Image (tube, grey):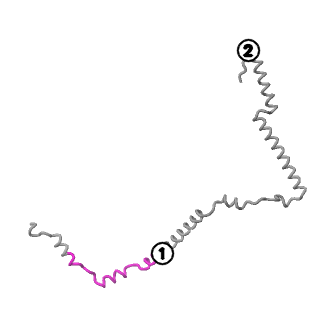
Amino acid sequence: MKEILPDIDKLFRDAVDQHEALPSPRVWDNIEQSLDKKTVIRITKRYDQLKKIAVVLLLLLGGVTGYLLLKPSTTTNLARESKVVTNPLPSLSPSKREAINKDARENNAVNNALANEINKLSSGTSPKLNKTAETETNTTNASQSSGRSNLY
């Protein structure tokens, strides 16, 4: 059988290709009339509007991203803009200004005295600390000599 019909697929393919059916122009006209052209135009316009909106949003996003990446940091701006204030209380009368300065000097003196006391306590040179240490030593010695232990 192979010898009689060696290439049957080719025979069928050639036969089908030769019998292509083309519709008449009148059929194409009827198909075009049945289509809703207004809907197609409306969908096309909406699609074009969405493309324009997408382009604007992408440009906006790119601009904001570029700005955030390329702007200098705020700490450098603060360092550049820092100014020495020569007169912090310009609108106050001289008597009020003097009262405020006096309070500030007193607060500084109290803060310095407290800082000195803390330093003395931490270094062990404070008279109060030495008296407390001597009292504890005397109490411990007395309790040991009496045979009792001082547990805390």
In this rendering, the answer to whether 10 lies above or below 132 is: below
**Between 58 and 122, which is closer to the camera in this rendering?**
122
Does 39 appear in magenta?
yes
**Between 38 and 88, which is closer to the camera in this rendering?**
88
Find residue 57 and report its horizontal and vertical position in percent: 54, 69
Residue at image mark 2: 147
Q: Quadrant of the C terminus?
A: top right
Q: In terms of sequence position, does the residue under pointer 2 or pointer 1 come before the other?
A: 1
> What is the C-alpha distance between the residues marked 2 and 1?
103 Å
| Residue for point 28% across, 81% down | 23
Q: Secondary structure at mark 1?
A: helix
Find residue 54 and report its horizontal and vertical position in percent: 51, 70
Find residue 71 and report its horizontal and vertical position in percent: 62, 63
Q: The magenta stretch spans which residues?
A: 16-45
| Residue for point 64% across, 60% down | 73
Q: Secondary structure at mark 2?
A: loop
Residue 48's tag is 1
